[in-house]
Image (cartoon, helix red, strand yellow):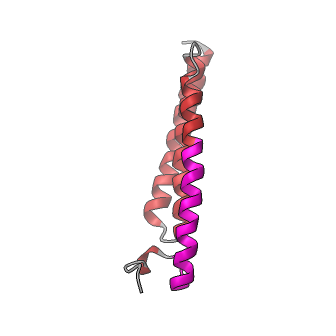
Amino acid sequence: MSSLGDAVEHYVLLSSLIFAIGGIGFLVRRNVLVQLMSIELMLNSVNLLFVAFNRVHGETMVGHVFAFFIIAVAAAEVAVGLAIVLSYYRLKSTVYTDEADLLRH
């Protein structure tokens, strides 16, 4: 296998490690802000995979295009997520998901 193929295997290993850290962080932590950061970690690990596989199949730029769209979706998710968290914090004075059982007064 070429050195480029070996590098892709390393990228896959790194990406799966980052995705696992993000998944565990989302499931274990109860702070909404930490959960949003964990989702961002998972999205960035997928971006890393797309760009790494695009290095092997470099005829088209499909991997980079998908990575660009994931970055755009992540930016929208952060904007909407932070708006929801801020409005919830103003309502309940906490950002923990355990106390988010009721969103209306």
Q: Residue at x 51, y 77 (%)?
A: 88
SS assignment for the magenta stretch, majority: helix
Q: Residue at x 53, y 56 (%)?
A: 38
Q: Residue at x 54, y 60 (%)?
A: 80
Task: Name the quadrant containing residue 49.
Answer: top right
Q: Which residues are magenta?
A: 71-95
Front-most of residues 85 and 40: 85
Figure check: 89 above or below 77: below
Q: Is residue 7 magenta?
A: no
Q: On the picture, is 48 further left or further right than 16? A: right
The reply to whether residue 18 is visible in this rendering is no
Q: Position of residue 102 (x, y in %)?
A: 38, 80
Figure check: 85 above or below 58: below
Q: Is residue 75 magenta?
A: yes
Front-most of residues 61 and 37: 61
The reply to whether residue 34 is visible in this rendering is yes
Q: Residue at x 37, y 79 (%)?
A: 101
